[in-house]
Structures are given as C-alpha cells and as structure tokens.
Amino acid sequence: MVTIAPLGSGSKGNALIVSAGGESLAIDAGFSRREMLARIVAHGVAAETLRAVLITHEHTDHTSGCRLLCDELQIPACMTPGTSRILEKRRALPQRVRQFSPGMRFNIGSFVVNAFAVPHDATEPVGFVVEYGNLKIGVATDLGEVNADVFSHLRGCDALVLESNYDPDMLAHSDRKLSLKRRIAGPAGHLENSAAAAALEKLTTERTKLVLLAHISSECNLPDLVAQQAGQKLAAKHLRWEIISQEGDTPSFEL
C-alpha cells in the first residue's frame, strides 16, 4: 500500500509526501521548515521516515523549506545539476545533495524514481514517476504543455498529480503585467484548465485510480472552474479525483 499526502499546492507553496513500507519521500518543500514539519505531522506521517526530498525545480514555492528541512532530518535533496547551481547561488542548498539528470532512473530506499524533463521557465525542471512495487505515482506540477515525453512518462500511472493552473479569461482580465501573462500562457509556463482536462482524458487509463489537480492559481482560477473542466473529462472513468488546496487540508489517499 502507498499513501499520498498532499501538504499543499499553489503559488504560496507546494509539497507532497509519498509513503510506503515505513519509508517516505517528499516531492518539493515549498513551505518553511516549521510549516513543512507541521503539515507532515498533521497528515500522520512520521518525519523520521523521510528518506529524501525530490525537487522539481528551483522556484521558491517549491524549495523554500528544502535546506533547513533536509539539514535537520539529515537527508539528501535530490535535484538536477541546473537546480543545484541556482540554489547554491542563493545559499539555499542543503548539506546533502544527490544530483540526477532528466531521464535518469534511481533508487531511494524501496522507491524507484524516474525523472523526466518538463517544459517550464526554470533552469532544468523535471517531473517524477515514483514506483513502489507495481504502483506508479506520476507528478508534474509546473509545465506549459504535456508534450510527447511528458505524456509517455505519465500515461497509465496508478495515481496522477497534474497542475490545472489558470483560467484563460481570468488571466487575461487580471491586473498582472502583460509580460507575466504571456509567460504563464506560453509553452514553458503553466497548464490552463481545459488543456489539463484534455490531457487527463488521455493520460488516465483503466489502471488509474486517483487524479489530484494541483497548483491552482489563487488570482486567475477557481476550484469550481477546475472541477467543471476536469469533471467532464473524468466523470466516465470511475476514478477518484480531488483538487489539492493551498491550505493543507486535503486528505491523504491510499493506493
């Protein structure tokens, strides 16, 4: 059995815990050390079971608690060389770092981790597929499009975490600068609701049991819009789906 504990997702912080067999992995650490530990405990995960933190990219809403959390628990942060260079310049690099390249497959305890490149405006961003036994959990929280490589890694996972970041009309009418709007809507930005829903329709198979929709914009999206778009595509598939909240009150899920 694998447990997925979404600690929170959005522009104010992103983190997810995958636990199985008395071991756990964190995917991103976008909250302060104190907040990370509080949310971990609130989800019933023992912090001492954490074996590593997997970092998708260097943006602070995915890394702000990484250094202090890893150093306190004496665990490595796993990241690409490009991400490592940026965090080192910020003096935000933990004492223990394990580097990998996009496309690599590596073991952490009983977990097998597959890292794959994603199109996002970061130095060397990745998504992950975490395997435990026959179970596969795919995670891609920041990406401008689901290209062929992303699709090949994520299709047919038992659980899938995918962003549904913004509503195009809300983004267009927001007070954000034009340059930021173009960045978000570009091929290396974020997934809008209808694109995420269309991707999920193709990514989910009979094997898929759970879909978690992540990184919902607080300014340019609404949970109801996400639910409407995704629900129409997923209703006939008879699988469970939920939206991960920013506040950390999304429950844990078992596979």
Image: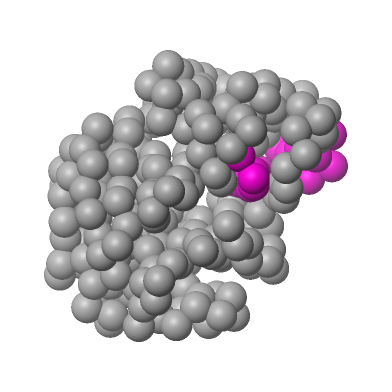
Q: Residue at x 40, y 63 (%)?
A: 26
Task: Report the side of 12 relative to 22 (left or right).
Answer: right
Above or below: residue 40 compared with residue 221: below
Above or below: residue 104 compared with residue 232: below
Residue 162 image position (x, y, % from top left): 57, 39
Task: Report the side of 15 relative to 42 (left or right).
Answer: left
Residue 223 highlighted magenta (yes or no): yes
Q: Residue at x 50, y 62 (%)?
A: 2
Residue 63 highlighted magenta (yes or no): no
Using the rendered image of the protein, determine whether residue 29 is visible from the camera's viewpoint.
no
Residue 19 image position (x, y, % from top left): 45, 67
Q: Nearer the viewer, residue 35 or 158?
A: 158
Residue 98 image position (x, y, % from top left): 16, 56
Q: Where is residue 208, by image quadrant? A: top right
Q: Where is residue 222, by image quadrant? A: top right
Q: Residue at x 42, y 24 (%)?
A: 152
Using the rendered image of the protein, determine whether residue 39 is visible from the camera's viewpoint.
yes
Q: Nearer the viewer, residue 5 or 87?
A: 5
Q: Nearer the viewer, residue 142 or 16?
A: 16
Coloration of the structure image: one colour
Above or below: residue 7 compared with residue 112: below
Part of the protein shown in magenta? 208-228
Q: Residue at x 43, y 67 (%)?
A: 20
Above or below: residue 39 compared with residue 207: below
Task: Report the side of 203 relative to 128 (left or right).
Answer: right
Task: Report the side of 104 relative to 13 (left or right).
Answer: left
Q: Where is residue 57, by image quadrant? A: top left
Which quarter of the rendering shows the C terminus?
bottom right
